[in-house]
């Protein structure tokens, strides 16, 4: 699906500077050779980064390389006892070199114990007028400084300059002069000769107000409850407020704004008022005059304001230029910019994403300086928040999502934005797991007007649904220093979302990228039991007509030492499916109710095919699907599903019986080697035992049904269903007997986004509809085009597999 590019993968969301893979560099032996080689490696920063060890940089520095000596001196100034084996990375930025390293050997600790890196900023220009490479120091007068105290009058004046410029000049940020006040706000001007405040219940009047975005943390925070409601309406003593709230009151008053909204004091925390107000978050933050973000504070007692030590002030280092002149080069600890990995704990919280995106203007009180972001601009005291190679992806969040506030943005762009929102949101933390939908409700409400379809369990039910069901957990080891996300988490129990929803997992998620996508799915509909469309879901099912191929799960090995997460392979006809990439949704080896045994029989449900821009065939027709040349260039996308009763039965069958059965009935041709659901008819028993496998996971009877055109046929469940699920697909479900027609009319139920076939169900009624067998999603599988340019046996099996009516829960 073509559209705007947004960060959809975890690698996109995180700064790609950390995904570094550099080949080992062999150093020559003589001093002259070392000097010449070091110039090529250390001075020529025409590439983006350089990785080196402290030992090697000391060797080249002592051999006369001036740049290596500068790097050595900068590192040793801050960490004089650093081990020679330590590796560091140097990134080239505009007028700076950024040096990144840790002062602990990563070989001696587990991935979860890797400390946050030390970052230094070296102020030099790395270019020559004649095309040669030289290092030019940046004069101290050209390096923006920070005040070192975000509570100072100088910083307050700078913040008001940013605010005034935005209000007067930024068209994308403009809202009406006065917005309706939220249900409750704090009145900061009720008492003329006192700092005390009071809670004010509005009557729909319009007035400017600020909002506070903060971490609740583990320290008890003052809350509005039924018992104190009337008392707080009379007076709240200033001294009873935690430090962050006091600072927010002080700063809001300095802007001459009377009202301030703080969630814990403006929403009644022990009644249903919370659910009601949570659904109004979009209006609260989008109507805010200014959102004050306590970004450096981990709890309400940490306060807004900060002072910094000498490490973040400029330090001079001696450097000899090419002409022999001795000059000063300046270095300091890097000033962090809106990165949750660098002392911005607020930005690691899930609730904050919508607060940040929906607010027209956000002023971040950081650990070293103030930072500003609005729909049109980003500013900071040191001016480096806009440096393209130094800023984090999250810093561009507001500008990236301007489409949400546009009346002319196409809905397809809204769907692309939603993928980016989900990818970023899934990286963030929730104190209460069941807030997964509530903390995103404001953004979902805002997106609905743009996308124009029903929203259920974090997904939009329209003709793009199949592609968005392909969310996946990332390769987590590509995110060093994110210690909370190094494990593939167990599945939540009780579940907070259906297994087909990204919200069902506790790990970060991402979406595959492709230019064009086509799905053979014919969706029957969905049923759901909602507490609230945006803030709660009891359960939900998707009913689809999908092709199914039976596979067997095989455990390969651990992803990395010290975890319980395994790599897996899927087998078809007893053989490994080469080139099939599998991503699990959760830790299926955890010893709980969601464990999936090694050797279990699973199903690959064919969701669709994607192509690169170069190979995209355009309109996908039945003729396209029969073109070997076109399909050989397609990437196959599947959901990995399990039916509990079928999987458990399969794992109990002796391997020798399975192998004997496969040997007896394995098809001779590759074209007929796919495993499909057994149609009506007798099948020989396995190990001389008849097995009833028609029961679904809740004990009710469910039948797999094969579709021939629009006619539905009941499938008898024989023991063969579990070990081979061999089919007579060529006889009963060939393209000439209905698949072509079905593919030709695919998605016809999805064309009208307002009529998505979803029905609300009675929360007390959990019976199966029409006896469809229930499947749970446990992962996704992807098969890239073969290097030979020909169809693989598994791809042919998927293309020829019969269609079945199934329920995914």
Image (cartoon, helix red, strand yellow):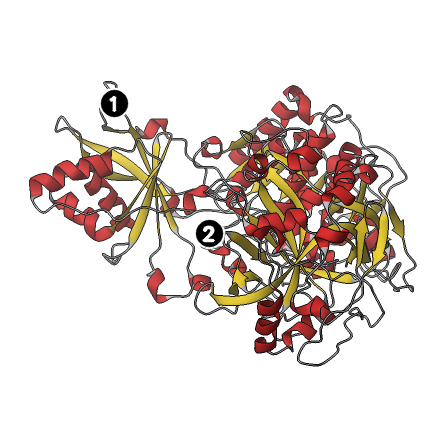
Which label's residue is closer to the chain start, 2 or 1? 1
- Of 441 and 662, the residue lying toward us: 662
Q: Position of residue 258 (x, y in %)?
A: 75, 37
Which sits in the foreground, 477 or 38? Answer: 477
- Which mark identifies residue 772? none
Q: Nearer the viewer, residue 59 or 565?
A: 565
Tell me if residue 63 can be seen: yes
Who is closer to the viewer here, 287 or 628?
A: 628
The single residue placed furthest to the bottom in the displayed view is 688
Position of residue 404 relative to residue 354, above or below, is: above
- In screen coordinates, is 340 left or right of 451? left
Q: Quadrant of the N terminus?
A: top right
Query: Residue 343: x, y in percent?
Result: 50, 50
Residue at the location (83% across, 48% down)? 524
Q: Gap between marks 2 and 1, in whole Å? A: 35 Å
Asked if residue 707 lies left or right of residue 801, the reply is right
> Would residue 511 be seen by someone viewing this image from the given angle?
no
Tell me residue 430's x, y (percent): 66, 57
Q: Where residue 128 is drawn, which disc sits there?
A: 1
Q: Circle 2 sits on which residue?
A: 478
Quadrant of the image containing the C terminus: bottom right
- Badge 2 marks a residue whose secondary structure is helix
- The picture places residue 364, in percent across and down from the top left corner, at 58, 41
Q: Are marks 2 and 1 in contact (CB under 8 Å)?
A: no
Neighbour tally class for label 1: few under 14, some 14-19, many 20 plus, Cα within 10 Å: few
């Amino acid at each position: 699906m073509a559209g705007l590019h947004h960060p959809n993968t975890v690698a996109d969301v995180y700064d790609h500077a950390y995904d570094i893979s550099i080949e080992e560099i062999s150093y020559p032996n003589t001093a002259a050779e070392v000097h010449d080689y070091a110039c090529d490696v250390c001075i020529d920063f025409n590439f983006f980064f350089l990785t080196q060890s402290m030992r090697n940089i000391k060797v080249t520095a002592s051999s006369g390389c001036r740049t290596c000596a500068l790097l050595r001196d900068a590192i040793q100034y801050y960490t004089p006892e650093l081990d020679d084996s330590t590796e560091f990375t140097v990134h080239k930025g505009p007028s700076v070199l950024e040096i990144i390293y840790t002062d602990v050997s990563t070989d001696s600790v587990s991935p979860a114990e890797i400390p946050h890196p030390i970052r230094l900023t070296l102020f030099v220009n790395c270019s020559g007028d004649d095309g040669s490479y030289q290092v030019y120091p940046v004069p101290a007068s050209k390096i923006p400084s920070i005040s070192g105290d975000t509570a100072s009058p100088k910083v307050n004046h700078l913040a008001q300059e940013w605010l005034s410029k935005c209000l007067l000049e930024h068209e994308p940020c403009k809202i009406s002069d006065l917005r309706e006040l939220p249900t409750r706000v704090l009145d900061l001007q009720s008492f003329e000769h006192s700092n005390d405040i009071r809670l004010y219940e509005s009557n729909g009047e319009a007035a400017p107000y600020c909002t506070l975005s903060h971490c609740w943390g583990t320290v008890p925070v003052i809350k509005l409850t039924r018992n104190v409601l009337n008392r707080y309406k009379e007076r709240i003593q200033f001294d009873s407020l935690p430090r962050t709230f006091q600072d927010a009151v002080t700063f809001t008053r300095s802007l001459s704004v009377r009202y301030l909204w703080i969630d814990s004091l403006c929403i009644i925390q022990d009644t249903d008022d919370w659910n009601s107000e949570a659904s109004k978050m979009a209006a609260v933050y989008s109507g805010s005059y200014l959102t004050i973000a306590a970004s450096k504070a981990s709890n309400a007692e940490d306060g807004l304001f900060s002072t910094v030590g000498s490490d973040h002030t400029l330090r001079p280092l001696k450097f000899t230029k090419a002409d022999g002149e001795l000059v000063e080069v300046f270095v300091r600890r890097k000033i962090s910019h809106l990165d949750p990995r660098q002392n911005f704990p607020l930005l690691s919280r899930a609730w904050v994403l919508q607060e940040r995106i929906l607010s027209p203007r956000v002023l971040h009180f950081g650990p070293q300086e103030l930072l500003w972001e609005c729909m049109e601009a980003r500013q900071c005291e040191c001016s480096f928040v806009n440096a393209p190679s130094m800023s984090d992806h999250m810093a561009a969040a507001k500008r990236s999502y301007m489409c949400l506030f546009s009346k002319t943005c196409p809905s397809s762009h809204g769907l692309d934005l939603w993928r980016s929102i989900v990818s970023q949101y899934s990286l963030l933390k929730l104190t209460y797991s069941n807030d997964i939908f509530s903390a995103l409700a404001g953004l979902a409400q805002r997106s609905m007007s743009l996308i124009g379809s029903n929203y259920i369990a974090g997904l939009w039910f329209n003709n793009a649904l199949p592609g968005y069901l392909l969310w996946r957990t990332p390769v987590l080891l590509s995110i060093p220093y994110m210690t909370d996300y190094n494990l593939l988490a167990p599945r939540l129990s009780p579940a907070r979302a259906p297994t087909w929803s990204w919200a069902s997992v506790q790990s970060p998620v991402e979406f595959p990228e492709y230019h064009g996508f086509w799905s053979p799915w014919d969706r029957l509909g969905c049923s759901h039991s909602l507490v609230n469309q945006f803030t709660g879901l009891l359960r939900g099912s998707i009913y689809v007509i999908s092709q199914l191929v039976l596979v067997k799960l095989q455990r390969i090995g651990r992803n990395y030492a010290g975890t319980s997460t395994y790599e897996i392979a899927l087998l078809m006809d007893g053989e490994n499916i080469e080139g099939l990439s599998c991503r699990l949704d959760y830790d299926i080896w955890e010893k709980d109710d969601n464990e999936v045994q090694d050797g279990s029989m699973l199903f690959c449900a064919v969701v669709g095919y994607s192509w690169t821009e170069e190979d995209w065939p355009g309109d996908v027709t039945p003729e396209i699907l029969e073109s070997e040349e076109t399909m050989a260039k397609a990437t196959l996308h599947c959901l990995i599903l399990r039916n509990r009763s079928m999987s458990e039965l399969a794992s109990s069958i002796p391997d020798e019986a399975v192998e004997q059965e496969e040997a007896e009935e394995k098809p001779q041709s590759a074209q007929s080697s796919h495993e499909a659901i057994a149609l009506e008819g007798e099948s020989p028993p396995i190990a001389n035992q008849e097995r009833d496998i028609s029961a679904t996971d809740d004990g009710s009877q469910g039948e797999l049904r094969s579709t021939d055109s629009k006619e539905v046929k009941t499938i008898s469940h024989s023991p063969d269903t579990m070990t081979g699920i061999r089919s007579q697909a060529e006889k009963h479900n060939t393209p000439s007997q209905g698949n072509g027609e079905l593919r030709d009319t695919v998605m016809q139920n999805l064309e009208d986004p307002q009529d998505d076939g979803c029905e609300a169900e009675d929360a007390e009624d959990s019976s199966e509809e029409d006896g469809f067998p229930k499947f749970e999603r446990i992962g996704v599988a992807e098969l890239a085009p073969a290097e030979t340019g020909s169809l693989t046996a598994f791809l042919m099996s998927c293309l020829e597999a019969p269609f079945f009516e199934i329920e995914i829960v």
